Amino acid sequence: MSSLIMLKSKIHDARVTATKLDYEGSIEMDVELIRLANLRVFEKVQVLNINSGARFETYVIEGKAGQREISLNGAAARLVEIGDRVIILSYAVVTPDELTAWRPTIIRLDSKNNPL
């Protein structure tokens, strides 16, 4: 069996708090949420918009700790509205030997982006 692409991190039910069209691009997130979800700055993520069904990719940048902000920037700002519910996913390549112990990090957020 060859390596598989597996879910590594998931932030479920995040709320978009801001959009910044005039920016290079990315998803800016509270640094505490980044750490809790086992994400890294500049890591590629997939964003799923629960409200509209839009799916797109971008990369993570660090926001201020404790602010619970989720901001979509650049072109991605056109794919969400403030208040939209989104799922943020990242993936990893996993070898067959790693599969039995593989467990993704999954966090769920309340309506104010606080971990449940």
Image: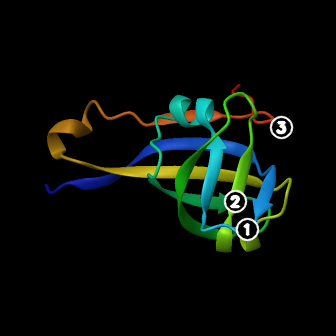
**Residue type at the position of mark 2:** Leu
Mark 1 surroundings within 10 Å by alpha-carbon count, few (fewer than 14), some (14 through 19), many (20 or more): many
Task: Tell me the kind of residue under disc 1.
Answer: Ala
Residue 65 x %, y %: 67, 30
Please give the residue where the numbered disc 1 appears in the rendered image: 77
Which residue is nearer to you in this view: 30 or 113?
30
Q: If the image is split into quadrants, where does the N terminus sit?
A: bottom left
Q: Which residue occupies 81% across, 56% down? A: 84
Please indicate whether residue 114 sits to the left or right of residue 94 in the image: right
Q: Which mark is residue 45?
A: none
Tell me if mark 2 has few (under 14), some (14-19) or many (20+) residues whose alpha carbon lies within 10 angstroms of its own. Answer: many
Q: Are marks 2 and 1 in contact (CB under 8 Å)?
A: yes
Q: Which residue is nearer to you in this view: 58 or 110?
A: 58
The label on residue 111 is 3
How far is mark 3 from mark 2, CA to CA? Answer: 17 Å
Query: What percent of the width, then of the height, locates residue 46?
Result: 53, 60
Q: Which residue is mark 2?
A: 72
Quick one: label 2 or label 1, which is nearer the N terminus?
2
* Residue 98 in the image: above or below residue 27: above
Q: Residues within 10 Å of mark 3 (few under 14, many from 20)?
A: few
Q: Nearer the viewer, mark 3 or mark 2?
A: 2
Left or right: residue 11 compared with residue 101: right
- Position of residue 61 measured from the top left corner of the image (x, y, whole percent): 56, 49
**Going from the N terminus, do you reach mark 3 or mark 2 first?**
2
Instruction: Tell me where residue 14 sits by quadrant.
Output: top right
For image coordinates 28% across by 30% down, the residue present is 101
| Horizontal side, residue 34 vs residue 2: left or right | right
Badge 3 element: loop
Dot 3 or dot 1, earlier in sequence: 1
Amino acid on which disc 3 is placed: Ser
Can you give x and y, in whole percent of width and height, for residue 57 in the image?
A: 53, 66
